[in-house]
Amino acid sequence: MTEIAAAAAALAAAGAAAAQAPPENVRGKLVELTERSISVEVAPGKRLDMRLAPEWSVQVMRPIRLEDLKPGRFVGVIEQPQPEGYGLASEVHMFLPGVRMGEGQQPWDRPPGSTMTQGDIGPLSDVPQGKAFELTYAGGKRKIVAPKGVPVVLINNEGREHIKVGVEVFILAWPEADGQRRVDAVATGEGGALPPL
């Protein structure tokens, strides 16, 4: 019984670890879409097949101006740490009012060495590079400088008609216990362009 209990505990721990595994960032061209699956060409000749969650949603990232960022809105910033102690933004996305997800800081894969920081934006000020502001999130704060010309988008929840073969997509693919990747949401840019993530 002890061996059985130990085996069961090991399986439970493995399942919990799998459930907590971080998602994989998937970028590329959509090459096949069915009722239950989506396939993306992530590199020439390399295709990734993933399972669609039953209630998968669509996000269309539409360009806005740097000046459209407003204090109090929840935003995400891909940023690279600078020697002076602030983060230099390479992309900013603003969520719709009332939407919050992924609050805090986590490593990001593009560009190398960057971080995704998501939180509430404070007052913005003009600096020579563009705009400076502070992001506040549970457990911390982060000063951000967004240079002029940095991609800034508003994340809109829209219909599945935007997701079709040929469009460029960004997906957070969640690993599952059976080795499959689960997709809860599919993001694309305006006109089917690759979102700046």
Image (spheres, grey):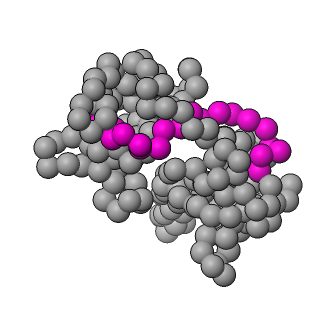
Q: Residue at x 29, y 50 (%)?
A: 80
| Furthest residue toward right | 35
Closer-to-camera residue (52/163): 163
**Quadrant of res 57:** top right
Left/right of residue 82 with respect to residue 176 in the rendered view = left
Q: Residue furthest bottom?
A: 45
- The residue that appears at 66% across and 49% down in the rendered structure is 188
In this rendering, the answer to whether 123 lies above or below 132 is above
Q: Nearer the viewer, residue 165 or 15?
A: 165
| Residue 25 belongs to magenta span | no
Q: Position of residue 120 (x, y in %)?
A: 39, 25
Residue occupying the point 49% across, 56% down: 21
As drawn, is 22 to the left or to the right of 37?
left
Q: Which corner quadrant of the image does residue 84 belong to?
A: top left
Q: Is residue 148 a member of the stretch shown in magenta?
A: yes
Question: Which residue occupies 80% across, 55% down?
Answer: 164
Q: Please provide the residue range marked out in magenta.
A: 138-163
Residue 179 on image: x %, y %: 63, 68
Above or below 171: residue 46: below
Residue 142 falls left or right of residue 178: left
Image coordinates of residue 25 in percent, x first then y, are 53, 58
Q: Name the residue at the left extreme.
A: 84
Residue 137 vertical placement versus 189 (above, below): above
Q: Is residue 63 above or below residue 80?
A: above
Residue 83 position, x and y percent, is 14, 49
